[in-house]
Image (cartoon, helix red, strand yellow):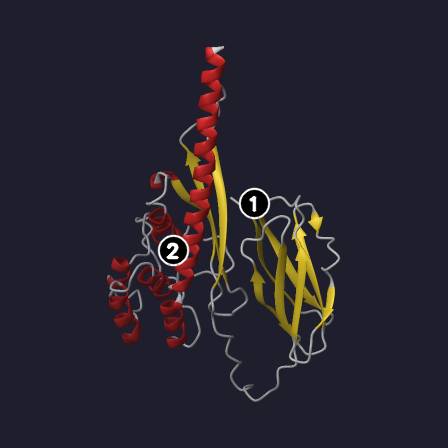
Amino acid sequence: MMPVLLLFLVLLAAFVQFSAAETALQAAADQAARQTAAHIRPAMLLLQQDGGKLPEPAPQDSTDPGHQATPETVQKVDSSPSQPQLPDWRQAAAEAAAYLPDPAGELAAAVLQGDWKALADMAAEPVGIAVFEPFLRKAAEDTPLEPSRITLASLSLPDLEGGESGFLKLEAQYEFPIRVPFLGKKIILHRTAAERVWIPDPLPSQGRADAPDTSPTVRITKLYPIPARPGRKATLEAAASPGAQVTLEVRYKSGNSVSKHVGTQTADASGHVEWSWLVSGNTTPGQWEVVVTTSDGASASMPFIVQKKP
């Protein structure tokens, strides 16, 4: 009887630790995404100074595979004739980047180095290794987690140049210190976070500034609450052309939502359209997707995170 009781107590303690680690990892991912999104403004200003075009990545020495984009490496610009020097304003910005609070300086350095690539997994790139992973570990310092066990599984940056995506998305993973009993397999926790980055609309093409924009457009302006809870209502607001027919799809792993309040709505005179629907109590927690589409072919999407109440 005593061995069974001891085994039960050990499993109960492991379950409590697992739940605490899961909650702490989500909190660290949310904090890292939120604070990083708030510090992208200096990088956006650098891009505007350069005419709205991201610089090409600087060539790296093939004998130095461990090169990473940091404020120190930004300041040490190669002055050899084979590599063009940075313009005066960018050189001054590179020198000032080291004095910006973390992670604003590293993000500005990523733009200066040409390491900013939107709509791609940047977890293994210099900006992910040198900027986001250390910042993610720093966000977990005051939690029960061991920061050294946290790694960045995936990273998607907002499109500062074209404005196609305004979301910063990251996935953190944590190697749980306890392995699966009798099997010895590692337990890896995964948690995702997404944060809206407020970037200006892309500038019109030269020579067509006075031409009216007749292309169909739609954009998501608000989604709340974040995260959504199973058994509770969620609301999405979008902006489209006045009178446009706009359809909302909520895409889960099992398929699209069949809630009666999800479907086609007509934008009002100001172009505003809104849906409120009930998130099923059986919805699997995770990161899903909401997509709005107009009758003339325009569409927009964003992550839709569902979590059970802790």
The residue drawn where x is 45% and y is 17% is 6
The residue drawn where x is 48% and y is 38% is 189
Amino acid type at mark 2: Val
Label 2: element kind: helix
Q: Position of residue 9 (x, y in %)?
A: 45, 22
Quarter of the figure with residue 93 = bottom left
Quarter of the figure with residue 38 = bottom left
Query: In the image, is 149 to the left or to the right of 79?
Result: right
Residue under label 1, please give it: 308
Q: Position of residue 66 (x, y in %)?
A: 32, 48
- Visible in this render: residue 77? no
Name of the residue lying farthest toward the bottom: 210
Query: In the image, is 139 to the left or to the right of 157?
Result: left
The residue drawn where x is 49% and y is 65% is 159
Amino acid type at mark 1: Lys
Label 1: element kind: loop
Other-residue count near label 2 (Cα within 10 Å), few / some / many at <14 / 14–19 / ≥20: many
Q: Nearer the viewer, residue 90 or 254?
A: 254
- Point out the tag, 1 or 2, that comes first from the N-terminus: 2
Q: Which mark is residue 127?
A: 2
The residue drawn where x is 31% and y is 62% is 105
Q: Which mark is residue 290?
A: none
Q: CA distance from mark 1 to mark 2?
A: 32 Å
Other-residue count near label 1 (Cα within 10 Å), few / some / many at <14 / 14–19 / ≥20: some
